Image (cartoon, rainbow, N blue to C red):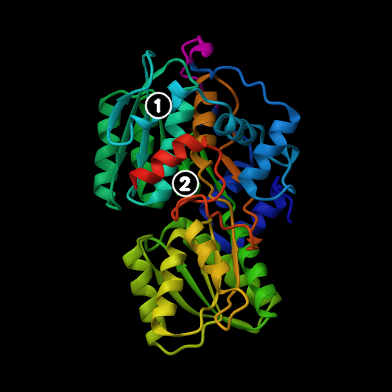
């Protein structure tokens, strides 16, 4: 496990290697607040942007971190305080009324969650998949802990840049209080975010982020360190394969900063540490089931020997495995971001049989949006918020018992939201 408080020297080295959006942003800022991150919009009354007080005990905090990262090796003192705050807010106790208010927003682009006069906007680049639905619900529930947030607006662009830009203009026109956003388009959104900031509307990006040129356009960029993620994925894969074999890289939308970041660093890690592991394929899936099936079918049709597939979405790793099964081709080892109950069931069923295959995965990461919300609200209170909030993404090997028969097939593994809300999200599709 590498240190998670990233040194200035390490940041510069990583930028030189990767150009990864999150790491580069941190390097350019020197891990200090940009001017956009320190200017308060609170008008002198910071308390109106505050959450209801947290009373997390050390034991509760430890349990939250273990659930978030699937390991007890990540501790609070390794993380930025804003990250810890966001995780605690996501994992706090919520009332039935708060859960009901969040659930009522599922099918509404604009919904009331309370009596406050502030409006939180969730701006999503491509909101059709389950991960985005869960993350939206997590943010909406967390917003109920801020008494002055009365309205939540959700707009998603279905992967279309022009729609995303138009949606942001809509939010500016509506004079929302703050925006949290998943940016599927990288730097192409920076100028639009700058327009919102110029109008006094702070923006915090999570997951997909605009990159180093956006440090003045957004308050912060919340994501795992994509380069370190690639290193971790490569190291995990090398152990699975005994340091030799062929691998394929899968990611979502073409050119997305997440995929570009981890893939470049994973390939570099293999070259330096396991040169007998060769990258023989790179595919885009647009993070859709159809895209995953098409990419896998095309890969199988090449006849190339593939010993492991590295992908950044476990729910569609299910489609990769199923496509190999249908083709009656040996299933490669799978190293994937997030977790999925169906995938774990498939893996467990094949253990001890001639079809046995290896699997490693990360936590669901649905807490990214929670960190972004805590950050943007801290900014409105005039608190210091770092322009990059990077967290670790450990990968753990699957083990028997990880599959939970009493949960739905599409359950994402441990999340910080209440089970009652998660159940409603899963049943809604």
Q: Look at the numbered discs 2 and 1 and tell me whether their residues touch, using CB distance below 8 Å.
A: no
Magenta span: chief secondary structure: loop
200 or 46, which is in the foreground?
46
Q: Residue furthest top?
A: 45
In the image, what residue occupies the spot 43% across and 21% down? Answer: 97
Q: Earlier in the sequence, mark 2 or mark 1?
A: 1
Q: Position of residue 384 (x, y in %)?
A: 60, 27
Does 202 sit left or right of 392 as displayed?
left
Q: Tell me how far mark 2 sits from mark 1, CA to CA.
A: 40 Å
In the image, what residue occupies the spot 69% across and 38% down? Answer: 63
210 or 216, which is in the foreground?
210
Mark 1 — residue? Answer: 100
206 or 153, which is in the foreground?
153
Q: How many marks?
A: 2
Q: Which residues are magenta?
A: 38-48
Mark 2 — residue? Answer: 213
Q: Residues within 10 Å of mark 1 (few under 14, many from 20)?
A: some
**Camera-side mark, 2 or 1:** 1
């Amino acid at each position: 496990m590498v240190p998670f408080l990233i040194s200035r020297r390490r940041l510069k080295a990583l930028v030189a290697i990767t150009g990864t959006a999150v790491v580069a942003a941190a390097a350019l800022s020197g891990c200090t607040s940009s001017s956009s991150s320190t200017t308060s919009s609170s008008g002198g009354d910071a308390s109106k942007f505050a959450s209801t007080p947290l009373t997390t005990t050390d034991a509760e905090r430890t349990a939250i971190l273990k659930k978030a990262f699937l390991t007890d090796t990540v501790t609070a003192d390794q993380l930025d305080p804003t990250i810890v705050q966001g995780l605690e807010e996501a994992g706090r106790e919520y009332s039935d009324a708060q859960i009901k208010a969040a659930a009522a927003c599922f099918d509404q682009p604009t919904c009331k969650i309370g009596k406050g006069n502030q409006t939180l906007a969730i701006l999503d680049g491509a909101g059709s998949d389950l991960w985005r639905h869960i993350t939206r619900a997590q943010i909406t529930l967390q917003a109920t802990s801020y008494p002055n947030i009365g309205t939540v607006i959700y707009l998603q662009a279905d992967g279309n840049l022009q729609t995303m830009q138009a949606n942001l203009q809509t939010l500016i026109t509506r004079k929302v209080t703050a925006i949290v956003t998943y940016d599927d388009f990288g730097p192409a959104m920076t100028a639009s975010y700058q327009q919102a900031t110029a109008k006094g509307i702070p923006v915090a990006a999570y997951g997909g982020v605009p990159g180093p040129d956006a440090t003045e356009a957004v308050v912060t960029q919340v994501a795992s360190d994509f380069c370190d993620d690639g290193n971790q994925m490569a190291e995990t894969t090398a152990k699975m394969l005994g340091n030799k074999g062929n691998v394929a890289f899968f990611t979502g939308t073409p050119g997305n900063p997440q995929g570009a970041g981890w893939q470049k660093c994973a390939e570099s890690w293999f070259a330096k540490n396991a040169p007998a592991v060769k990258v023989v394929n790179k595919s885009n899936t647009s993070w859709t089931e159809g895209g995953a099936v098409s990419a896998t079918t095309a890969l199988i049709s090449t006849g190339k020997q593939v010993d492991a597939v590295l992908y950044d979405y476990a729910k569609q790793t299910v489609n990769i495995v199923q496509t190999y099964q249908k083709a009656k081709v040996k299933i490669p080892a799978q190293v994937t971001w997030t977790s999925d109950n169906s995938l774990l069931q498939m893996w467990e069923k094949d253990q001890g049989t001639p079809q046995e295959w290896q699997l490693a995965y990360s936590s669901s990461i649905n807490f990214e949006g929670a960190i972004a919300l805590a950050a943007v609200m801290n900014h409105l209170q005039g608190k210091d918020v770092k322009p990059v909030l990077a967290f670790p993404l450990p990968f753990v090997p699957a083990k028997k018992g990880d599959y939970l028969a009493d949960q739905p097939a599409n359950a994402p593994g441990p999340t910080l939201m209440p089970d009652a809300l998660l159940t409603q999200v899963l049943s809604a599709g």
